[in-house]
Amino acid sequence: NVSFQQSFSEIFAMTATYDVTWRKPVFEFGEKASDALAILAEEANAAEMALYYNGLPGVEQVKIFRDFGLGSFDEKFLRGGSATTFRVNTSGYGHRLTLAMGLPFTNDGAVVLEAARIYDGAEYWISPIDTGTEGNIQTCWSVAAMQEDFPFQAECADDNLADLNDNSIPGETFVSMHRGIADLEKNNNELEDLLLFPTCDDLDLETSNRRSSSNDGPTNPTARYAEYFFEVGYDDEVLLCQNRGLGGNDCDYRDDGNFLDFIDRSNEYDGEDDRFIRLAQESTDFEDFCDLIVDANRDLEDAFTTLESHIFDWRNEIAHVQIHCGWHGDDWNGDDHYDDDHHDDVYHDDDGWMGGMHRE
């Protein structure tokens, strides 16, 4: 780990043929992250990654390395400036190495080495990715690291909320290069705009004014939930409309009672990863919903301690991987051939064994 104070989580490791990650890549830029990668990035937990690949055709082995301590001293994460060495026995079709680890001092960052060639002396420098599964709000209570994990100079080390890990803030929805840790302390207004709920007063929902056309929003004066969700950006007619007209061009917006009944019965809108829906589910009526929003905003305003960029940020690649190879033992006879799709080479080991590598 060649960063300053950005730690690595437990490490997922896999040896496999090249086509495994060609068929089932760990990630693709611009595409939605898999659930397994999201869990690794948001929770610093590699177990789902192991389940995701274990047993697939072409996979030789999957492992999780999580012991970064020295002797009896146990380290939960691989800290900035630290290195770890582990051994992977591979033969036959273990042509490529894949590594993946979360960044516990980010909301949803990860480092991935995908399908790297395995040969003696191989060396790789890796930049972090943003999985896009969670908003980069960088608060103490929204990252995988716990309070005891923070370095002493970080404000989160003294924040009791740091033992929480709230992943409910929506992210970019696609994988991109990570932009690093922003200095949000200087831009608290931006953080407030991102985190605070628009209040009912902000949207003027205490009045009886309604739009003249249902195509522009609710016209029913009792459809205040529908109007609130419409105003904050929800456009799903299944959620907002009780009855849709022929051709789908008109909508009878759900009244408040119908709206609550719908989200109570819905499998899609269950509130698990949607804080707006969750507040609506907790409310008894729209006035109560408005009060819950005010209370939630008050709690959020008291929890705006964020991770410091001068401690946890980076500007370059932050992972350095080196591979050193040796034979398994005296019983190795060199009969296994190595099919690789990137190079032609012939090499000798110290005992004179010659192995052929050829392109398929």
Image (cartoon, grey):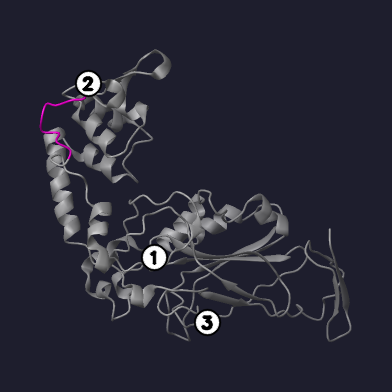
Q: From what the image shows, is residue 243 above or below residue 116?
A: above
Look at the numbered disc 1 and give the secondary structure of its residue.
loop
Residue at the spot x=77%, y=80% of the render? 329
Q: Residues within 10 Å of mark 1 (few under 14, many from 20)?
A: many
Residue labelled with disc 2: 212
**Residue 16 lies in the magenta stretch:** no
Disc 2 is placed on an element classified as loop
Q: Nearer the viewer, residue 87 or 196?
A: 196
- Of all residues shown, which one is farthest toward the front? 212
Disc nearest the viewer among 2 and 1: 2
Spot occupied by residue 224 in the image (x, y as percentages of width and height): 19, 30
The stretch in magenta equals 203-212
Give the answer, above or below, for where 351 lies relative to 117. Answer: below
Q: Please identify the quadrant where the C terminus is shown.
A: bottom right
In the rendered structure, which disc, 2 or 1, sits on the residue that comes first in sequence?
Answer: 1
Pick whichever, 355 or 89, lies toward us: 355
Q: Residues within 10 Å of mark 2 (few under 14, many from 20)?
A: few
What residue is shown with label 1? Answer: 106
Could you tell which of marks 3 and 1 lies nearer the N-terminus?
Answer: 3
- What residue lies at 53% left-to-right and 49% top-to-bottom? 31
Q: Would you name the residue on which mark 3 appears?
A: 83
